[in-house]
Amino acid sequence: MSSNPLKVALLAQAGPARDRLREAIEAAGAQCVLESDPQEIDPADVPTSEAKVVLVALDPQTEDALEAFDEVLADPDVEVIYEEASLAAAREGWDMARWQRHLVAKMQSHGDVLPPGTEQEAPETGQSTRFDHISSAAGDAPEREWQGGSAAPAETTNPFDPVFAETADQESGHVPVFEPGDVADGLDLSLTLDPVVDNDDAAAVEASAEPRSPATAVASGEEGEAAGRFGVLTLDDGSAPLVSGDSEESDDRLARDIVELEERISGLTLVDDSPRKEPEHARGAVLVLAGLGGPDAVRQLVAAMPAGFPRPVLIQQRLDGGRHDRLVAQMQRATELPVRLAEADQYAMAGTVYILAEELGIDVSDAGIRFQTGSELVASLPSSDSAVLLLSGTDPSVVDATLRLGWAGALVAGQSADGCYDATASAALASRGGDTATPAELAQRLGERWPA
């Protein structure tokens, strides 16, 4: 134990849950300065113990007694960690070890939740000796001697090497030439560039090279042929008269057509393709989904949210016992926003936190957001003005619907792996391009998106 161990106060009833939490405190190397049932001590005993972390095991009796500790637990210098007493007592084996590592990470304020022995080991310096030995052994191996004729293998070259053609004079100093003996017998190789012309066509070639005047072409009767050759280059074959008697009438008709066209264009209006604004009363909401390990993350989220937040906050926390009314009391102690238990046919109000049972959904209309049994949650939210947050223990099956809502404009994020007990849904969201952050950072993003 270090010289200045972390001081922790444990508030829990006597029983297995309290024993498990005490073991976690010892595993963290912390000092338990206060261990008692909150029903048996005075709230002033907590600040007197100088504890920096207060670990609370929640059960029905403890929740009622904690109302007297509201002022003490609201101290910003004290970190409060809540754990469900029934879950802490029921964990065994691998699940208990994993839960204990996460709890230790929370108390020590770090994100290392890996079991011992999984640290990345640095490569040993002695490993290089083995590779050097192999390399030296390979260098000492005798080289094979090729057996065969003394003739050297023929070099395969490209018939034309453009690089060699450009640099041959500089690199080799001479240009290779053909020797008389390189040409097979019976072949006549000519290196001249003079064109080969038959004697009968020599006069015709010389005559075609002389320029001819247009007059000569007309006199020789080749005018039609010349017109035929150049006619393909123009749309005017020269047969139409240059001046027509109907030119003035055509100009007037063209002017009238232009005037009519301008009148039609002046009467046209542009289509308004800007996105249609939703009615003010049909604004969206913030949906928070959580499960195992989620109550603590939800508390951190609502505790960091600003007062007067301009959107309703809908929290669907899966609970084994289904006691959402007790969750309302817990959340109310953590935030300044009013916390209510959502009921069917009730409309959601801005600036209010609602706790939703698992069977409760929403219906969005021009009248607002109304809670309705059996309705969808994620898919029913207005995408342009809503947010979906996936905290610890969220069912991974909602990731697809959440991403679709995010692609349509909603704010979508998950809880980061640091301090998250069950990050399956958040990891799936992150693997497909989603963002993750701590609950306090998520609350800050909500405040930036919708300023109070």
Image: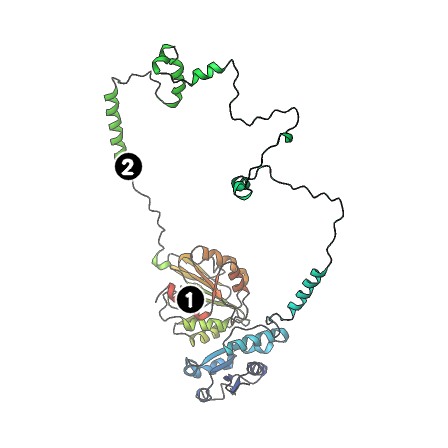
Depicted 354 relative to depicted 174: above or below: below
Depicted 138 relative to depicted 68: above or below: above
Q: CA distance from mark 2 to mark 1?
A: 51 Å
Q: Nearer the viewer, residue 205 or 382?
A: 205
Residue 259 position within the rendered picture, expressed as x and y whole percent measured from the top left: 24, 31
Q: Nearer the viewer, residue 206 or 422?
A: 206
Alpha-carbon neighbours of circle 2 within 10 Å: few (<14), some, or many (≥20)?
few
Residue 265 marker: 2
Q: Secondary structure at mark 2?
A: helix
Q: Amino acid at mark 1?
A: Val
Q: Secondary structure at mark 1?
A: strand
User: Residue shown at 65%/24% (left/top)?
Assistant: 186
Q: Nearer the viewer, residue 24 or 215?
A: 215
Q: Nearer the viewer, residue 291 or 195?
A: 195
Drawn side of residue 388 relative to residue 104, left or right: left
Q: The N terminus lies in which quarter of the figure?
A: bottom right
Q: Amino acid at mark 2?
A: Ile
Whether residue 390 appears in this view of the structure is no
Q: Give the residue at mark 1.
A: 313
